[in-house]
Image (cartoon, grey):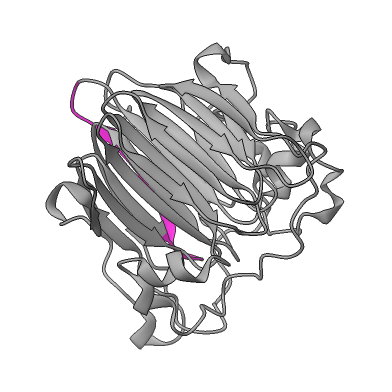
Amino acid sequence: MSSMYPAGDPRAALTSAQAVPAAPRSRARAATVLDLVAEKPDAELPLGGRTWVVRGQNFVVALTDVRAGERLAVEGGDDEHIVVVCAGTVSVSHAGHDTDDETVHAAASTVVIVPPGDSTLTAHTDGRVVRIFAAGRAGLAAAARNADDYRAANPLVALPGTPGRPLSERMRVHRLDDVEPEPGRLGRILRSSSLMINWFPDEHQPRDPDRLSPHWHDDFEQCSVTLAGTYVHHLRTTWTSRLADWRPDEHIQVESPSITVIPPPLIHTTQAVGDGLHQLLDIFAPPRRDFLDQGWVLNAADYAAADDVPAHDTQKRPPA
């Protein structure tokens, strides 16, 4: 049996011998695909900025097109969150409990890991930021435009487990333009105590249609955020013995920004199409042990050993 990953794709190391997803314990849910270009924002900010909020079972994503001078406040919380600065320049201030207050500055292509507690993001120029939280922030999760989808938990998604233990109570800043590609390493992966992101390197051409990578996850969601460019999400529901579970294949084109939540065990792959800049960010919660075990996580040394991370089933691929 040959892998569906093209030659040289690091993810081939994650696949198991299972050829197709096992029949799920309940009917697999459909993906949530939100092309935000066509969607009204969930919040309009005083200076003209706009925020869209989308959730998964274990995470919440807030994408904001900010205007210079706007401030985004986060109150309390007992878990870290992630700030992804996609465009523009911002500062993030954190009110420390056992540490002094601190402020960090971040420009485009920077990720800030923010400790628990009160914090404020201030935009110094127009730009775009993505903030990612654990779903335990009930108020933010309830504000998500797809909150009704999670009034009943998806039984196919594993529980988040115990958050990882950071070795520092300070903010950590990661400028990803400084991360050089490395053979055998997937993307640019960072974690927090409860979350993981993979911000893929920029692409300036469409994805080779002969080098797609259809795969699935047995027990966790994948959230894909397109930040620039046009993409097609290819989605397939594996047949089971129950005809009612079957769905037609989907090939959904989105512009940027967009947010897509892919539940297990949908087979999926994402294809950049058209010319120009393409930027893609994937989100997982909790952090993926398989990525940690491969040594792909750039800030793994900032946390206690990966033993606290739930042992998710690894990424898998359908048969050739």
Q: Is 3 on the left-hand or right-hand side of 148? A: right
Residue with the most extreme left position: 38
Which residue is pictured at 49% across the width and 49% down the height? 132
Identify the magenta region: 262-275
Q: Residue at x 82, y 46 (%)?
A: 306
**Which of the two residues, 156 or 44, is positioned nearer the viewer here?**
44
In reply to whether residue 82 is colored magenta, the answer given is no
Residue found at x 26% / y 39%: 231
Question: Is 287 drawn above or below residue 236 in the view shown?
Answer: above
Vertical relation: 41 (above or below) 247: above
Residue 17, percent from left and from top: 68, 54
Q: Is residue 170 left or right of residue 283?
A: right
Q: Nearer the viewer, residue 208 or 129?
A: 129
**Nearer-the-camera pick, 97 or 199:** 97
- Counting from the top left corner in percent of width and height, residue 147 is at 37, 73
- Total marks drawn? 0
Q: Nearer the viewer, residue 122 or 135?
A: 122
Q: Is residue 271 magenta?
A: yes
